[in-house]
Image: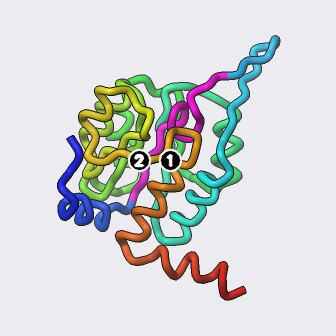
């Protein structure tokens, strides 16, 4: 159930680690497979820039996904995302591993998901976020949900909202106007 606005803002301000699922969050959930078994995924460029802005604003980014994909590895390397856990079906267990790797606690962490497999991680962090087109159970248990759909700007929305809550967005955007 979404949080009351004052509590939501307080939690947004304490986030230092933003953890993202991939399929249905950074993509629209479509899986494209070539005849030879190659995987193709479409990422929204604005989500990518949102990740870069979040990093510029001091947030650490991480990926926690149930699938293994070279495409994800390449995209995250391009974006400078250092923490990447792929092929992890038990996202609650994987979250604990990720927190250990990064040194952040659950109270400093947010997780963005879209499907029921994301609930074990979403429910253990300070801020569980569902994309607008998430599964109904995920929407029900999320602390906050985006207006944008997965793969269509939801990650950018999350990044900008967290940066705004932390008082960093205005300076980041001003740099584009001052050049």
Local packing at callout 2 (Cα closer than 10 Å; few below 14, some 14-19, many 20+) is many
Q: Are marks 1 and 2 in contact (CB under 8 Å)?
A: yes
Which residues are the magenta region?
Answer: 17-31
What is the residue that sits farthest to the bottom in this orientation?
A: 178
Q: How many marks?
A: 2
Residue at x 56%, y 28% (from the top left corner): 29
Residue at x 25%, y 51% (from the top left corner): 126
Image disc number at residue 146: 2
Q: Is residue 138 left or right of residue 32?
A: left
Spot occupied by residue 16 in the image (x, y as percentages of width and height): 38, 62
Judging by the rendered image, the residue that carries numbered circle 1 is 154
What is the residue that sits farthest to the right in this orientation?
A: 35
Going from the N terminus, do you reach mark 1 or mark 2 first? 2
Residue at x 37%, y 31% (from the top left corner): 118
* Above-or-below relation of 169 to 14: below
Q: Is residue 22 magenta?
A: yes
Q: What secondary structure characterizes most of the magenta part?
A: loop
What is the residue that sits farthest to the front in this orientation?
A: 147
Spot occupied by residue 53 in the image (x, y as percentages of width and height): 56, 66
């Amino acid at each position: 159930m979404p949080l009351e606005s004052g509590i939501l803002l307080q939690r947004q301000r304490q986030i230092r680690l933003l953890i993202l699922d991939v399929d249905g969050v950074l993509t629209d959930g479509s899986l494209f497979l070539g005849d030879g078994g190659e995987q193709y995924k479409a990422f929204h460029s604005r989500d990518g820039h949102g990740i870069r802005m979040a990093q510029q604003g001091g947030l650490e980014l991480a990926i926690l996904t149930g699938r293994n994909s070279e495409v994800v590895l390449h995209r995250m390397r391009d974006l400078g995302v250092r923490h990447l856990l792929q092929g992890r079906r038990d996202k609650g267990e994987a979250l604990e591993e990720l927190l250990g790797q990064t040194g952040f606690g659950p109270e400093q962490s947010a997780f963005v998901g879209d499907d029921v497999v994301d609930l074990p991680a979403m429910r253990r962090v300070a801020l569980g976020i569902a994309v607008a087109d998430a599964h109904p159970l995920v929407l029900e248990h999320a602390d906050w949900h985006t207006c944008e759909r997965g793969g269509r700007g939801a990650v950018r929305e999350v990044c900008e909202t967290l940066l705004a809550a932390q008082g960093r967005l205005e300076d980041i955007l001003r740099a584009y106007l001052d050049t």
